Each structure stands twice: as structure tokens, then as C-alpha cells.
Amino acid sequence: MQSKIDKFTIPIGPQHPALKEPGHFEFSVDGEIVTDASVRLGYVHRGIEKGTEGRNWVQSLYLLERICGICSHVHATAYCLGVEKLAGVEVPPRAQAIRVLVAELERVHSHMLWLGVAAHEAGFDTLFMYSWRDRETVMNLLEGITGNRVNYSANVLGGVKCDISAEQDEAIRQGVDFLEERTRHYLEVVTSDMMFLRRTRGVATTPKAQARELGLIGPTGRASGISHDVRVDAPYAAYDIYPVKLITATAGDLEARFIVRINELFESYRVIRQILDTLPEGELTVRMPRRIKEGETVSRVEAPRGELFYFIKSNGTDTPERIKVRTPTLPNMASVLVLAIGHQLADIPMILTGIDPCFSCNDRMVVVKDSGGDNRAMTWEALRQYGIEYYR
Amino acid sequence: MKLSTMWKDALGSLLRRPATEKYPFVRLRAPEQLRSQLHWDLEACTGCGLCAKDCPADAIEIITLDRKAKRFVFHYAIDRCTFCAQCVVSCRQGCLKMSNDEWELASLTKEPLRVYYGEDADVETVLAGAPEPDAEPAPGD
């Protein structure tokens, strides 16, 4: 009997699907060409939003900081800015400047990390090794300023914990000079290396209209010409004093994403130097009330991967009533599924890495309210029961 | 378009010493700001408990034996601590400090990770009632 196979599906993940984070992808292929793609996320759902409801405002800061290991500072900053707005507290200018300084150093480390990971996925391990060696410079700077390589805990409600001493000032300037020189070299590598360009130029090309339709944000969107950066559009912390230039490209392919991220590094170096030159004197913290006034607010910051959104609601006690987080990976994830179609299977890791995904960030529970009698909506108890039955 | 753009880096590295460190044979000096083991000063403490209240990891417990006579024991669980230094910020008396040099805290047993600060006699009193840290958990725990 002759069987006709019209669709061959390759499951990838949840373990090790190109990155060291869990996500399950299914790619239907016709030979080497991908014809359909689907994704399943949620393997690292940790219930952090719910967790904040059982902790006080101070404790929640450290829990939220752990949403992401790479961009922990922006999470803490978004939360602190929101809570300070609710409490009506004015944070000293020096503290705001240090927040921006640490945020830009964090962006440098995150983009360098991405550069290495993306190079690794393309099979260019030399670039991966050298970019990560150089990334140690910024990791050491962050450790020197805040006291930790990751989860810096630089923020407290009402200010920052760490100050910039004269020696640190000098160390940061030296580190940034070294990194700038290396970054210039890496920009040349990613725009001129023939073998590497075969993996990036014209791959996953997203025209501006399609990028807008897919809702791309952050450097991924800016590589397609979407002029959106929270630091520019709605300056927070000290970005109104230290303005950032918007970096965009028009090509929309993987090469453009490399160029945008690397050019953002130069912009970060410039801002870091400007902050060090004009760091205002003054206090690092102001007194915060333990109970936050009743109300709700929205806080937006630009994470290395795009816009990070916090909704914070207080009921007047020392515990948050509701915190909702939207991280930038989720809106970008849909583009992987659309762009994968028509590409070779071997390009998939590069396309996935191109959005700089962070799986732990985006795994969140959504409760759908059953308004129209839709039988797909389940109560928590029914969902739990379904899970038990499913795995029995 | 070039064929190889990183050969200079690769060849140059042949002549340089490795970028990696030889830990544990060579121990780097930790930066001044590094957050490692927490230390507590009994003299300054008022036993207000704000450090324990704000600790996100539930790593601090202030055991009050006699508030008037200032008989406090500070129980610090290193294995729970996330080294965020919020307790140091929260303490209004300035009696908490994180050292920057005691960062090699890994252990195969829990015993070295349970630290009790306070007068020796008070610590002994507390320890007499504390469960054995390395005991096997009872069935059903």
C-alpha cells in the first residue's frame, strides 16, 4: 500500500530549541522549506504576578526583578517608577541619573550577549567567543557599581542603593572606551563578513507595513523602520535630561537587526559618558511610605528587547492589589511563526534569535472571562481537573 | 565583502594570556560593593524587626528573648538569602552590614548555612530548641 505524506512536522523543544530556554515549536516542512509553524509557550510560568499579591511593596520589588535575569534592572525600574508615582514621591535627580546609567550598562551587556548568541546560532563561534569575552568588561563594571553581576538590586523604592565614586567613574570610562573600539570592530564584522552575511542578509525580511501588522517592538521593530522607543517617545527617569537618539533601519532583515542593536550600543556609550560628565550631586533616596495610596497606574520603560509595560494597582495597604506585566518578547514572538514560512529549516534558529527572545519573561497566565457562553473558557478548578485527567 | 574578518583576533590571541581566571588557584579580590555574607551588630539593634519584614527571601528571623534587657538572637539563613541588601537599607539603626569578601558560601550540608548572631549564652538557648538542620525530613513533610 502506498501512503501519501503531504505534511511532515518537525517538533523542536521544549528542551533546547536553539536557545537555552524552553519553548515548543512545530514546523511543517516540504523538503527543507518551512510551510507552517506553531509555538507553545508557558513552560516557565512562575506565577510572579500572583506572588506579588502576597508580599509587601518592598519585597515585591525583588520578586519582579527576577522576572528576567538579563534585564532585571528595567523590571525594577518600571516597578519603582510606578510605585513612586502612586505614592507621589519625587526621587532625587542623582538617583534617577544612576538608574539610567545602570540601565544603559545593562543594555550594553544584553546587546553584547545577544550578539554572541546570534553569532553562535549562525555557526560563527569566533564572534560568539570574542563578543562574550568583551562583555565581561561591562559585567565587571556592573558588579563594581551595584555589587552583583546579575539581579543588580540597584533600585530601592524611592531611589537607588549604589553611588558612583571617582574610581568607578574612571573604571566606567575606561571600560566604555574599550567596548566602543570593540563594538566598531563587530559592526564591521557583521556588515562585511561574507559567510556571515549569507546567514543574515535578506533573511526574515520584514517590511515596515508587515512589522506594524505583527506588532513588532524594540530593536526588532526599529530594524524595520518602526520609529518607536519609550526612551524617546515618553522619557522616564532621567531620559529627559539625557536624551537618546532613535536608531532605526529600513531593510528589516536579520542584518538590519544586527546593525540597529550595535548602533544602539554606540548610543548607550554616549549616554553613559554624558551621565558621568554631568552627574548631579545630591541624595540617593527619599523616604517612601510603607502603605501606598489607593490608585492605579501604568509604567512604561524601554527594556533592551523593547517596551516593558507595568500596570500597578494599590488598595491603600502595604501590599499590591494587582500587578500586570507585559514583556517585549511576547509581541515579537508571533513574527517568528510568520517569517519562518518560506525559509529553510536551518534558518529557523537565526530567525528565532533575531527577535532576542526571553522565554522566562513572557510566560504569564491569562484568564479569559466567560462573557458570551464560550465553552472554551474554563474556571481555575475545571482547568486543574482537566490537567489531572489529561495526564492520568 | 570579506572572506574572514576575525582572523586577526584569533591569531592575536595566540600571543596573549588566556582571558579566563585560574580560580580557585588564584582568587580575585572582590569589588568593594560586592554583597556577600550579612553581619549584625547587637549593640545597635533595637529589635524592631523591619529587616525581617522586608526580607524578600524570608532569610532573617529576630528571636527576642528579653526586649528590655536587649537579649536578641539574629538568625540568618544564608541558603535563603538572595544578597539583595534590602535589610541593610531598611535598618534605621545601621546595625546590618554585608561583607564583600565572604562569598565562597557553598556547602554540602545545611549546618554552616544557619548562622546565629548574638551573645553566646542566648544563642545556646535558641539552639537548644532549634531543629537539627541536616536531619532527614520526617515522612509527610
Image: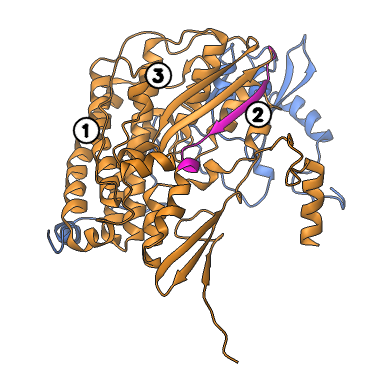
Mark 3 vs mark 1: same chain?
Answer: yes
Q: Earlier in the sequence, mark 3 or mark 1?
A: 1
Gap in angstroms between the C-alphas marked 3 and 1: 27 Å
Q: Position of residue A364 (x, y in %)?
A: 61, 40
Q: Is the residue A331 above or below the residue A302 in the image? A: below
Provide the chain ID for the residue under circle 2.
A
Q: Residue at x 30, y 57 (%)?
A: A203
Q: Which residue is mark 3?
A: A236
**In the figure, the blue chain has which letter?**
B
| Residue A369 position in % (x across, y down) | 72, 35
Q: CA distance from mark 2 to mark 3?
A: 24 Å
Name chain A's colour: orange
Neighbour class for label 3 at 10 Å: few (<14), some, many (≥20)? many
Q: Which residue is mark 2?
A: A52
Q: Secondary structure at mark 2?
A: helix
**Secondary structure under the numbered disc 1 in the rendered image:** helix
Which residue matches tag 1?
Answer: A174
Using the numbered discs, state the Cα–Cα distance from disc 2 to disc 1 in whole angstroms. 39 Å
- Residue type, label 2: Thr
Q: Could you tell me which residue is drawn at 41 percent across and 75 percent down?
A: A31
Q: Is residue B118 above or below residue A213?
A: above
**Over which residues does the magenta segment extend?**
A316-331
Left/right of residue A309 with respect to residue B68 in the rendered view: left
Residue B1, magenta (yes or no) = no
What is the quadrant of the N terminus of chain A in the image?
A: bottom right
Query: In the rendered structure, which disc, 2 or 3, sits on the residue that comes first in sequence?
Result: 2
Q: Nearer the viewer, residue A354 or B115?
A: A354
Q: Chain of mark 1?
A: A
Q: Are marks 2 and 1 on the same chain?
A: yes
Residue A322 sits inside the magenta stretch: yes
